[in-house]
Image (spheres, helix red, strand yellow):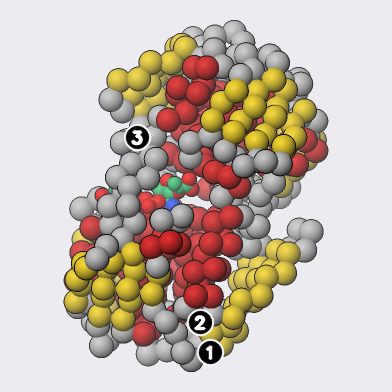
Amino acid sequence: MDAIVVKGNGPLKGETHASGAKNAALPILAASILAEGQHTFRNVPDLADVATMLKLLRTMGLEAERRTGKRSHECTLEWKGVVHPEAPYDLVKTMRASVLVLGPLLARHGRARVSMPGGCAIGARPIDQHLKGLKALGADIELTEGYVEARAKRLKGGTVSFDVITVTGTENIMMAAVLAKGRTLIENAAREPEVEELARVLNKMGARISGAGSDVITIDGVDTLKPVDHAIIADRIEAGTLLVASAITAGDVLVKNAVPEHLEPVLQKLREVGCQIAVEAGGIRLKGPERVLAADIKTKEHPGFPTDMQAQLMALLSSAKGTSVITENIFENRFMHVAELRRMGADISVEGPTAVVRGVSKLSGAQVMATDLRASASLVLAGLHAEGKTTIARVYHLDRGYERLERKLSALGANIRRIKG
Ligand code: EPU
């Protein structure tokens, strides 16, 4: 297993860029199931999770060719007829987002057998809302031997009113409804930019979706969809992480491709703690202060502060002037990084969904362990600021969602390297 070694090395400086968005790419690749023929996706990030999704689609009969250029990651996917509509446990257990094939398989092939994802490091993460939505569209659902078995000759439009706001749930139902007969309303829909991006792609394929990006999405079913050529939006969470890397080192970094509208709540917080932020041609520049100020954060669904940036902000606030209170409202167990940050000298206590972060003047390097994707990123960030050497084990978590983070940081002047294990 690879590890990352990082040594605090002063301010980061220069330009970097955000790659394609993982959480947009995964549903979009799954959406390819909805139309026979050859799709071309551009700006597909080179990530372990994307490789897992392609592997899953290949087990179903997809011919996928991946071409990754220096900055233009391109991926051609071709579906020809026979599809084996099953997502096996072995793949679903490595990536929960595999559940995104459920909606498109059912819509296009009338049948899907998808392993139920179990819990994961950050929470129980049930999929009851996905199943409730599919039932509202007329699917028969059975749970047998750890698998969801879903059937429907043709789904019928209906009203799906989510009890909790769910990103992949909204995406799954949107993909199911595009080929249903009649109109579907999704109420209490997730408003994340990745949901909007998926709707954009589906509409390019010939779907009739309106309202994506708001909490009510309307979908008028069509009979068939056509393949698509699409460039995926930039990853707002990767961009945010790179901006925090600048903030935590009192650096001056321009993150190209970062979309300010997607990052508004994060930029607001970064300004609040004393960072200077400028929107420049094609990106966002962040100049970090000598020492950041404390701030309180409450994670919330978009357009609130994203849970996927909570761990990174905690790393930043660990050395802030003053005490910050961070409340995690989306996942019940997303504080796994706290124990590791403490090993680096952070002063953090947790009670229920709330972490109290008393800023210390300096963190110190230590051996730490990555526990999930964003937790890994927070440890890398803490390592950039810490005195001495930080070794982060289990970086396969990081590779699921960050494209060569250590290379991007090293190009900005960080003393960071990967040790192959
Ligand atoms: N929930 C339910 N029932 C459901 C679905 C969700 O109770 O049927 C609950 C979850 O347990 C959670 C909350 O609703 O407490 C929100 O979960 P959501 O379904 O929105 O999460 P997700 O769709 O599984 C996506 C991202 C996550 C991101 C969350 C929240 C993808 C592939 N994953 O997950 O990304 O944290 O939305 O924004 O889009 C990451 O990239 O590191 C990551 C974990």
Residue 169 or residue 275, whichever sits in front = 169
Q: Earlier in the sequence, mark 2 or mark 3?
A: 2
The answer to the question of whether label 1 and label 2 lie on touching residues, with beta carbons closer than 8 A, is yes
Residue under label 3: 333
Could you tell me the amino acid type at mark 2?
Answer: Gly
Could you tell me the amino acid type at mark 3?
Answer: Asn
Residue under label 2: 61
The answer to whether residue 25 of the structure is visible from this angle is yes
Task: Name the secondary structure under disc 3.
Answer: loop
* Residue 216, image x, y percentages: 30, 61
Crowding around mark 3 (Cα neighbors within 10 Å: few <14, some 14 to 19, many 20+) is: some
Q: Earlier in the sequence, mark 1 or mark 3?
A: 1
Q: Residue at x 77, y 63 (%)?
A: 69
Q: Residue at x 66, y 62 (%)?
A: 43
The answer to whether residue 252 of the structure is visible from this angle is no
Residue under label 1: 80
The answer to the question of whether label 2 and label 3 lie on touching residues, with beta carbons closer than 8 A, is no
Name the quadrant of the N terminus.
top right
Q: Residue at x 43, y 61 (%)?
A: 90
Front of the two marks 2 and 3 = 2
The Cα atoms of the two marked residues, 2 and 3, are separated by 36 Å
The Cα atoms of the two marked residues, 1 and 3, are separated by 42 Å
Could you tell me the amino acid type at mark 1?
Answer: Lys
* Residue 122 sits in quarter: top left
Residue 58 or residue 233, whichever sits in front = 58
